[in-house]
Image (cartoon, rainbow, N blue to C red):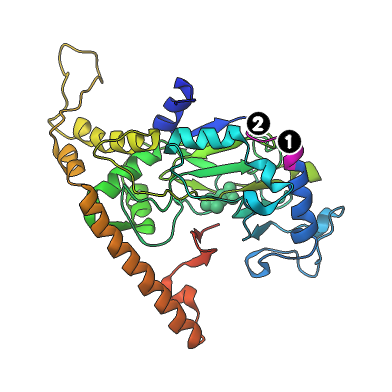
Amino acid sequence: MNTLMAEEEEDFMTRGYMVIREAFSAETAARCREEIWKHYILKGNFEHDYTVLPENRVPILREDPTTWPLKVPIGVSFGEDEGEPWRDVFTPKLKTAIDAVCGKDATLPFGCGWWMITFPGYAQGPWEADGTWHIDGQELQRYPFSKEVGLVPVMFFSDVLPNGGGTAVAEGSHIAIAQAMMESGLQGVSNKEVVQTVLCRDHPPFTLVELTGKAGDVVLVHPLLLHARSKNLSPINEQGIRFMCHPAISLKNDLNLQHPVTLLERSIADAILSMDRHSSGEEIGRGDEEEGEKEATGNGAAALALQALTPQACVMYNERQQALLLEQAERQQVAEEEGRDMQSMLGFSTFGSKKARYS
Ligand SMILES: O=C(O)CCC(=O)C(=O)O
């Protein structure tokens, strides 16, 4: 059953995100914030090395902004089975919206994880992205049908006003990323490479948008949408501290782009097919029809390439993906045994098991 409104579907297809207001209650968000304060921020229970702390001013005191750091990353995930208050985040409203994008029961369980708490008092205006533009996922080969990251719910645990450090998104960039991934076909492409390809291309500049909202709102972000942390320019008080988390939701199965059914599948298949509409000489509708009106040829290069993504081909390449994962784990083990720094070996840093860390 489709529970989304046409406008929400359209937002997801064209902008690459849809906003679910009051996905969980503001009161639940407040209780979760207290947990984070009590067990993590005040205890210094986070990744110190990755956090800019004012010199000689630890520990962090809640009532004393001069002790606040720029940001606190917390690499812990709180699932539905975590008990109060976390289980109240996973409301039927939120689950229904996720199902409406990815398909009923198509997702693996996820938790409220990959926290980045950002504090006011550091950034100078104007507002802009402050972290690295990226898409989520491990630094492995990615394919347009990849199941590793199916959706990125950006979860608001505090009110985030304009300029308050809401995640920056490049509207519509999921289309360019899907197309660039498709160009690599069954060879796959790394996250880093596909992002660089798109950012270096002469695209019409993407519109940058700051995701703002109230505690309890969730923005369902397309897995291929470019996003980044942004400057928190809020006034220096507790309300200006941004509590957001960005888990990645994995899918049980690869996407079926040959016969797209779900909104997620349709958004990626459409992005790929639009390559045919926009490729030179294949635009239909020049002349009599309104300017800019185009039509898919249905048998262009992109359509044919899409048809090559058979379930068998996907299985084959997933096996290669598993082999890469294994290889990476083995390299990590060797590096650990030799006491070497894995970050310098891989050229990126790991953050939990699912997401590369970018901020
Ligand atoms: O902190 C943010 O707003 C962005 C975080 C992010 O991009 C991520 O966790 O993938």
Q: CA distance from mark 1 to mark 2?
A: 8 Å
Which span of residues is magenta-colored? 23-29
Q: Is residue 24 left or right of residue 198?
A: right
Instruction: Give the residue number, with chain letter if any, for mark 1.
Output: 26
Residue 243 is tagged as none
The residue at the far right in this view is 63
> Is the C terminus in the top left, top right, bottom left or bottom right quadrant?
bottom right
Instruction: Give the residue number, with chain letter if any, for mark 2.
Output: 22
Query: Does residue 166 appear in the picture of this structure?
Result: no
Say which amino acid is labelled 1.
Ala
Q: Is residue 334 left or right of residue 308?
A: right
Q: Using the image as rendered, state which of residue 262 and residue 235 is in the foreground.
A: 262
Which of the 4 image quadrants contains residue 189?
bottom left
Residue 116, placed above or below residue 128: below
Which of the 4 image quadrants contains residue 69?
bottom right
Asked if the residues shown at circle 1 and circle 2 are in contact, with their CB atoms under 8 angstroms apart, the answer is yes
Percent position (x, y) of residue 340?
49, 84
Q: Residue 128 in magenta?
A: no
Q: Using the image as rendered, state which of residue 126 and residue 141 is in the foreground.
A: 141
